Image (spheres, rainbow, N blue to C red):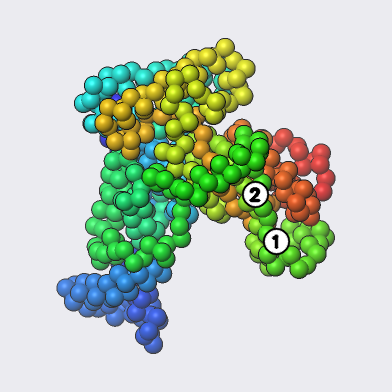
């Protein structure tokens, strides 16, 4: 099943604890942070440690979150499952560079919790998950793009990631992972615990009170894929489904033009802002809002959640699964177009159902659903409630509508762009692949779209 995960801090701001302490003191002292660092550094080691602890306990420890922002930790994490990276990528103030699932190979293997390995279904679980890797390789050899073949791989598939964050957001990550309202797999908690432990070794007083409770409402709330339940999301899904919406496509919920409801949005002004790189005017576009409800695979959601300038709420995976765990029922299974037209379609469907039924059997045998969840495939759909602003309608939509984008998210982004074009044509005119707004192609392979469509 492969090697256990490894966490290593590969980069950190010099003296992160000292920087945050000086910054906190600088809010009240006459001296600059630089001068305060000099004063603190001149103290005997024991006295300096005592001072840092007292200052951080009285600032960051009391929920003065910006003190925790004045540092940076960069982690290289190897052989963690995709189930864990789904959690890491949800807080919007953490940043990531992730190994593509297109690079997944059977030799990397998958994680299985001991509770499953030692259960009556342990051997069966290993067989079914191994079969998903064999099918992945079979599809790849048959010419199906790896980005589509990966949909059949389980959430417990191992991968690598590089993650950057400050103390405040690392505390947020720990708190949301261990929340009583969240059912995160034990491997996810283990990865997050190890990140905190290593950061604590470098800056113990920054993380001394990381379990504090009063900060929760002050953190910028993130999507929660492992939440036990999300009542509002379920109500929204039921409501839109009951209205006869075509739920396989993004459902446009609303737009609020904010300040611009009182103004005429000038096409000419928007064009000038784009072509002249006028950031003042571009910032105004952040006050235009669009809301969508999109059904997407877990593979696609993993890309969408890394679009950090989108505000997102996700249907918890546990709320999504009851639709799937009946034999022969796979109405909401995501099948990439390249697989739909292939001879391997039936094998794909069969493997998808085998993995979902494995989840059902594990859960019904008494294994916590938080441990069983990692055996499901990336082809499972969840609903993502997405808010984007007018700037995102130009930039992130441009990134995702490019032909180089992954197929599923490209289709979703293009459908969102079509809605934007109808709602606010002055913005929608620029909801095009990135080459249109840039005026040139930033990709290695130039499809020439911007040359054909002059704006």
Q: Residue at x 66, y 46 (%)?
A: 252
In front: label 1 or label 2: 2
Give left or right: position of 395 versus 83.
Answer: right
Residue 113 occupies quadrant: top left
Q: Secondary structure at mark 1?
A: loop
Residue under label 2:
253
Q: Which quarter of the figure is the N terminus placed in?
A: top left
Neighbours of disc 2 within 10 Å: few (<14), some (14-19), many (20+):
some
Instruction: Determine whether 392 is above or below 248 in the image.
Output: below
- Residue 330: x, y in percent? 51, 24
Query: Residue lying furthest bottom in this view?
Result: 30
Using the image as rendered, state which of residue 414 and residue 254 is in the foreground: 254
Q: Residue at x 78, y 62 (%)?
A: 265
Give left or right: position of 234 versus 403.
Answer: left
Q: Residue at x 41, y 64 (%)?
A: 217
Neighbours of disc 1 within 10 Å: few (<14), some (14-19), many (20+):
some
Q: Secondary structure at mark 2?
A: strand
- Residue 341: x, y in percent? 62, 17
Instruction: Determine whether 27 is above or below 140 in the image.
Output: below
Using the image as rendered, state which of residue 425 and residue 274 is in the foreground: 425
Whether residue 279 is visible, yes or no, is no
Tag 1 and tag 2, C-beta contact below 8 Å: no
Q: Residue at x 46, y 45 (%)?
A: 97
Query: Cα distance, mark 1 to mark 2?
Result: 13 Å
Residue under label 1:
257
- Residue 64: x, y in percent? 37, 72
Give left or right: position of 279 versus 315.
Answer: right
Instruction: Determine whether 31 is above or below 95 in the image.
Output: below
Give left or right: position of 245 versus 137.
Answer: right
Residue 71 occupies quadrant: bottom left
Using the image as rendered, state which of residue 203 and residue 217 is in the foreground: 217
Query: Residue lying furthest left in this view?
Result: 46
């Amino acid at each position: 099943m492969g090697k256990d995960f490894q966490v290593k801090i590969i980069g950190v701001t010099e003296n992160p604890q000292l920087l945050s302490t000086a910054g906190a003191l600088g809010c009240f002292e006459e001296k600059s942070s630089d001068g305060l660092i000099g004063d603190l550094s001149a103290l005997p080691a024991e006295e300096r440690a005592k001072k840092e602890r007292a200052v951080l306990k009285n600032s960051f420890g009391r929920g003065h979150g910006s003190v925790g922002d004045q540092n940076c930790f960069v982690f290289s994490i190897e052989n963690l499952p995709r189930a864990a990276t789904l959690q890491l990528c949800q807080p919007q103030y953490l940043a990531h560079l992730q190994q593509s699932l297109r690079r997944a190979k059977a030799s990397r293997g998958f994680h299985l919790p001991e509770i499953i390995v030692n259960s009556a279904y342990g051997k069966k679980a290993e067989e079914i998950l191994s079969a998903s890797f064999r099918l992945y390789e079979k599809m790849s050899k048959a010419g199906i793009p790896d980005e589509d073949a990966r949909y059949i791989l389980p959430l417990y598939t191992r991968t690598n990631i590089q993650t950057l964050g400050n103390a405040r957001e690392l505390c947020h990550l720990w708190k949301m992972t261990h929340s009583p309202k969240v059912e995160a797999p034990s491997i996810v908690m283990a990865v997050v615990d190890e990140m905190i432990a290593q950061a604590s070794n470098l800056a113990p007083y920054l993380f001394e009170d990381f379990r504090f409770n009063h900060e929760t409402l002050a953190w910028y709330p993130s999507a929660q894929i492992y939440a036990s339940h999300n009542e509002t999301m379920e109500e929204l899904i039921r409501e839109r489904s009951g209205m006869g919406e075509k739920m396989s496509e993004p459902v446009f919920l609303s737009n609020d033009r904010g300040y611009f409801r009182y103004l005429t949005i000038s096409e000419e002004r928007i064009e000038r802002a784009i072509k002249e790189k006028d950031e003042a005017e571009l910032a105004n576009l952040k006050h235009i809002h669009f809301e969508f409800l999109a059904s997407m695979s877990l593979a696609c959601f993993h890309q969408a959640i890394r679009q950090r300038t989108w505000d997102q709420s996700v249907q918890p995976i546990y709320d999504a699964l009851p639709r799937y765990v009946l034999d022969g029922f796979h109405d909401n299974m995501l099948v990439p177009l390249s697989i739909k037209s292939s001879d391997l379609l039936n094998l794909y469907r069969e493997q998808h159902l085998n993995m979902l039924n494995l989840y059902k059997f594990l859960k019904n045998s008494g294994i916590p659903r938080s441990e069983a969840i990692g055996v499901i495939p990336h082809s499972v759909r969840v609903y993502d409630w997405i808010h984007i602003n007018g700037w995102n309608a130009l930039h992130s939509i441009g990134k995702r509508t490019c032909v180089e984008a992954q197929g599923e998210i490209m289709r979703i982004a293009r459908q969102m762009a079509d809605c934007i074009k109808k709602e606010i044509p002055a913005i929608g005119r620029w909801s095009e692949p990135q080459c249109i707004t840039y005026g040139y192609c930033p990709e290695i392979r130039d499809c020439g779209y911007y040359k054909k469509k002059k704006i």
